[in-house]
Image: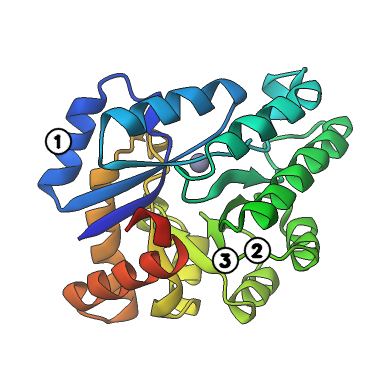
Amino acid sequence: MLIDIHCHANLYLVIDEIIKEAKSVGVQKIISVGMSVLSLERILEISNKYNIIYPALGIHPEEVKMNKDIIKQMDSVVDIIRKNKEKICAIGEIGMDHHFIKEIELYPPQKIIFENMLSLAQELELPVNLHTKGAEKIVFDMLPSYKIPNVNIHWYSGPEDYLNVGIDRGYYFSITPAIKYSPVVKKTVLKVDMEHILLESDGPVKYSGKISTPAMIREVLNIVSKYKDIPAEKLEDQIYENTKNIFPKIF
Ligand SMILES: [Zn+2]
C-alpha cells in the first residue's frame, strides 16, 4: 500500500479521475495539505466526501505574497484549525520560503505565520509538514524551540549540511517525482536511511511540464528502490511503517 503524504488535492478539477488512477496503482491514502486561507474549508470538504483523503491544515509560506490580509486573518485561521483538530493528521504545509519569495519585506510576516503554526502544532500535539526552500537555516534554527511530535521535510532541495542536521534530528524526508531528474533529491534519497523516507506527489505541481498526480508515487518508489538497492516490495512495507510512525492519525 502506498500513501501520498503531500498533495494539494483541492486544486484538481476532476478529482474522481485522480483518485481512480491513484487506487489503480495501489495508492490507498492521500494527505491533502493546506495552503491558502481559502483552501482550508475546501480540504475539509473533500476529505468528508472522499475517504481516501486525509486533511492537514496550515498556511503556506507563499501566502504572504498572495494575500495581503493574512496577518490580520491569523487568529481566525488558528481558530479554524483548532476547531478541526480531531479531523486533521498534521499541521502543513507550513514553513519559510526565501527562494520563490524574493521581497525581503515579506520575510517578517512569513516568520510570524510560521511561528503561529509551530505553536499550534505544539499545542495540538501534531506533526508538521515543512516547506524550507531557500530558508533551510532559519527553519532548522527555529525548530528546536518547539516541542513537536515529528517533523516531515517536504521535497528537500537545500544544502547538504542542513540535510545532515535533519537526519541527525530524526526528521522524515518525503520524496517527490523530481527524483527523476534532480541530483539534490537523489542525494537526499541516498543519505536518508530507509526508516525516514516518505513518498509524495506535491500534485498538481508540474514536473518537466507534466501535471503530477498521486499515482506517480509508484514510479517514485521504484526509483528510490533502485538508488537504495532495496527491493521495491520491502521498501514499500518500510515506507508504510514510516508513514504510520509520523502520521498515526490516518490509520
Ligand atoms: Zn506543496
Q: From the image, which quarter does the C terminus lie in?
A: bottom left
Can residue 183 be spotted in the picture? no
In the rendered image of this protein, does residue 131 appear above or below residue 76? Answer: below
- Asked if ligand 1 lies within 8 A of label 1, the reply is no
Residue at the (28%, 53%) spot, across then down: 217
Kindly check if marks 3 and 2 are in contact, taking CB atoms under 8 A apart as contact.
Answer: yes
182 or 114, nearer to the observer: 114
Q: From the image, which quarter does the N terminus lie in?
A: bottom left
> Counting other residues with Cα less than 10 Å from the Cα at mark 2, is it few (<14), some (14-19), or many (20 or more)?
some
- Asked if ligand 1 lies within 8 A of label 2, the reply is no
Q: Which residue is mark 1?
A: 20
> Counting other residues with Cα less than 10 Å from the Cα at mark 3, is it few (<14), some (14-19), or many (20 or more)?
some
Q: CA distance from mark 3 to mark 1?
A: 30 Å
246 or 135, nearer to the observer: 246
What's under tag 1, amino acid-wise?
Lys
Q: CA distance from mark 3 to mark 2?
A: 6 Å
Q: Which residue is mark 2?
A: 148
What's under tag 2, amino acid-wise?
Ile
Residue at the (70%, 43%) spot, across then down: 97
Q: CA distance from mark 1 to mark 2?
A: 34 Å
Secondary structure at numbered mark 1? helix
Residue 92 lies left or right of residue 190; in this view the side is right
Secondary structure at numbered mark 3? loop
The picture quadrant where one finds residue 193 is bottom left
